[in-house]
Structure formats: structure tokens, C-alpha cells
Amino acid sequence: MSIPRLYNTEAIVLRKLELGEADSILTLYTPHQGKIKAVAKGIRKAKSKIGGHAELLVHSQMLLARAKSLDTITQSQTIDSFIGLRNDLWATSSALYVAELVDRFTEESEESQPVFRLLLETLRRLCNARHKELALRYFEVHLFRLLGYQPELHQCVACHTSLRPSSCYFTPDGGGVLCSNCRHRNLVVCPLSLNALKVFRFIQAQPFAEVDRLKVGPSLAGELKQVMRRYIRYLLERELKCAGWLDRLERESPVSG
Amino acid sequence: MNSDFLPTAKPMARLIEELHRLPGVGPKSAQRLAYHLLSASEEQARALAEAIVALKEKIILCSSCQNITETTPCSICQDQRRDRSLICVVERPMEILALERTRGYKGLYHVLHGAISPMDGVGPEDLKVRELLARLQDNKVHEIILATNPNLEGEATTMYLQRLITPMGIRVTRLARGLPFGSDLEYADEVTLTRALEGRQEV
């Protein structure tokens, strides 16, 4: 039996690259094929039927046609355009940051329905969560759990004893936390306050509805962000482009996330 | 494509190689164009060559609006009949041509030469944002029309500029989002339809 030429899939648009006069190459995240690239012909014309249905960060139902190299998007119908994101520069930029993380951390054609669901839920949360910064941390922690990079937060990664309730140290290359006795075992460490450790554990164990109720002040939120940034920088061996932009926006006009 | 491997006369191989570098020109199209130019008249070939050289030698950016021009300030910025209290901000020079074709806009322009795109590492400092802010210092401008593209990067650019310019006491507007003329309502996406409903007008 031959494989059908046309197939239906849900997709979230992660990236868009211009191709020729009016075409684009889109990077999509789909529930059953993971990340794929596809061509959208004529999408940049004002009268394109696909146009807004395949814009960045839109969740759509798409019909694709198989081709030798890149599949072609033949139809697209928006399921959710996350309109709440689009009127707020910080939320738009955060959603791009989320898309960049998924794009960098996943390989093409590796199915992961949980990653798809996490991405979808995170985009919704960036529209309407009370604490949008925490929605980003929740996304990072759970993306790493799903991809096998979950940091160890309950025992020291060097001596394997349970952590006592005191300040400790996070080591990106050790993949977790060091107790104060073992901190000198690793050169690259950053201090982790007890409160930050507690919030990370809470994020790992609880659903987002619970996490969204936490009261996290600006300095603790900043610490959580910096720890994740260091971990991401270590895993990717590069800086995320959207991260610098988010920092700049926050410097120029601090957001209440 | 390396011209040394082409079994043809050196000048021909060199032209094929140069044409091949243009966007959308594959090896076969490059060959066809090169052989066409060989059989074309002397004047035609010379006109093309001179047009290309003139493009690089004579085109500069207007010191005021940053549009491509031969003289600075450009003809639009020099035109005394245009409304100097109104600036329309666009991403690329081509968009000025599109807006001028409407014959309905009588203000000035400003070309950003791109849009903010965090994923591609394009920030405000890569665009002509500083030049735009400099034009607003003399209090002569009363309104800025943000005419960036109706996509995510364009919207991000609009929101960023709005944040910078509104505190200066200047009216900031953007082009309406609506349905393209001659299209079908059924294919419109939710963002466009929502904005079109918000901006509906008395008939």
C-alpha cells in the first residue's frame, strides 16, 4: 500500500524563513511527527488563503502534501491564534523565546506529543496566566524533564546525600545541585537560595494552576531566570537569541510578569 | 559554481558564474541568460552593464527618511507641498512605492530597513530607529503612522516604536487590519477578522 500523498496534522508555527518572492519555509511543531519543515507557497501575498492561518505562533489544522524534500502546506485553518499574545510586546517576545527553545532542543521528525501539549499550554498561559514569568520557568523545567535533562534537585549530585534545608549550589555540567560541602568539587557553580530551590521543586512536582498561585518577588524571579539561563547556555553551548531581547525589554521597562 | 570547470570561453563562464549568484537564478537559467546576452545587440548589453554600475555608484540613503535616492534629501523630503507634520514608517523602500500608488498620502516617510525579529537576532539598533527618533526632536511632527507588515515581526516593531514615541507627546497610529479587496471572507484568519470587527465602520 502506498503512503497517501496528502495528510492532515495539527501544527504550531515555530519559525518562518522567506523563500523567493512570496513563499516561506515554515518550521512546524506537530503532535505526531514532532518538528518538521514545510513550504508555504504564496504565503506572503496579501490575498494568500493560507496567510494568517500559518503565521508565527499560530496553532492550526493543516493539510500537507508530501514531496521529495520539503512537504508543501496546501490548506490551513487556525485553531487558536493566541490573540492575547499579540497586543503585548513582552508576551509576544516570551512566546518567541519558547518557540526558539523548542526549535533548538528538538530534532526533526522525532515524535513527542507531550512536548506538543506543553508548547500549546505554555502559549495559552502566556495569554492569560497571572504570573507569566513563572509560566516560562514551568515550560523550561518541564521541557527538560520531557527531553531527559531534568536537573537533580533532591540530593547532592556529588555525594548523593539528601540536601539539608540551606543554601546550596547549582552546577549546570553536573546536572543538578551540590551541597555546601561539595561545592568545590565543581568549578562552574552558581549559588542557589533555599527559596529558589523550593520553587524549582514545586514547579517540578505540581500542576501549573498551583504554581501560578505562588508569590514570587522580583529578586527571586530574577534568580530563577538566571539559573535556567545558565543551564540552557551549558546544554546548547550558545546563547538563545530571544533571551537577550527579553532582558533588554525588561531593562527598558520592567514588566510585572 | 566554479567557472574553471565550465567547458566554454572564459568571459562566458565568468558571466554565467556572476548571474548564477542572483536570487532565483539556477545554473540553467544563468546559462540561458548569458547566451542570450551574447546574441543581443551591443547597446542592449552595454545598457544593462551601465545600469548595474550606476545602481551601485549613484544610489545613497536619504539623510532624512533613509529611503534609497540619488540626491539627499530625496525628492519626497524636498517636496514643499507635502505635510511635514506626518511621518509614515515602513519596513522597506518598496513599500513607499506601494503607498505612493494610492495617491492618497501626502505626508513624509521613514524607512526602517527591516523589522524587529528576536529569533534572527535583529534588534532596534540594526534598524533606522535612532534616525527616526532624531527626526522627532524638533516638535514639528504631530503624527507617526506605523505601516509595518501585518505579521508578528511587524507587530513587534510597531509595539516597540509605540512605546518609545508615545511618551514624546506625538500621536502614534497604525494602519488598520482588515480584509484585502477582492478576497473571500471564508479564508480570512481569526486575527484579521477580530481586528476587522474591532475597526468596523459606519456605511
Image: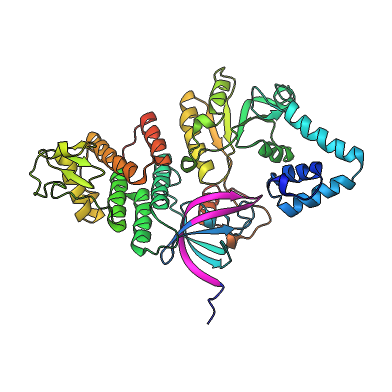
Task: State left or right for residue A231 relative to residue B15.
Answer: left
Residue B124: image location, x then y, percent: 50, 32
Q: Where on the picture, by quarter, is residue B63?
A: top right
Q: Tell me the chief SS of the magenta region.
A: strand
Residues shaded magenta: A6-27
Q: Is residue B9 above or below residue B109?
A: below
Residue A225: image location, x then y, percent: 28, 40
Q: How is the image coloured?
A: rainbow
Q: Is residue B180 magenta?
A: no
Q: Is residue B160 above or below residue B84?
A: below
Q: Is residue A10 magenta?
A: yes
Q: Where on the picture, by quarter, is residue A164?
A: top left
Foreground residue among B99 and B185: B99
Q: Residue at x 11, y 38 (%)?
A: A180
Q: Residue at x 29, y 43 (%)?
A: A231
Residue A184: image location, x then y, percent: 15, 36
Foreground residue among A202 and B193: A202
Task: State left or right for residue B62 relative to residue A63.
Answer: right
Residue B67: image location, x then y, percent: 67, 30
Q: Residue at x 68, y 56 (%)?
A: B182
Q: Residue at x 57, y 73 (%)?
A: A5
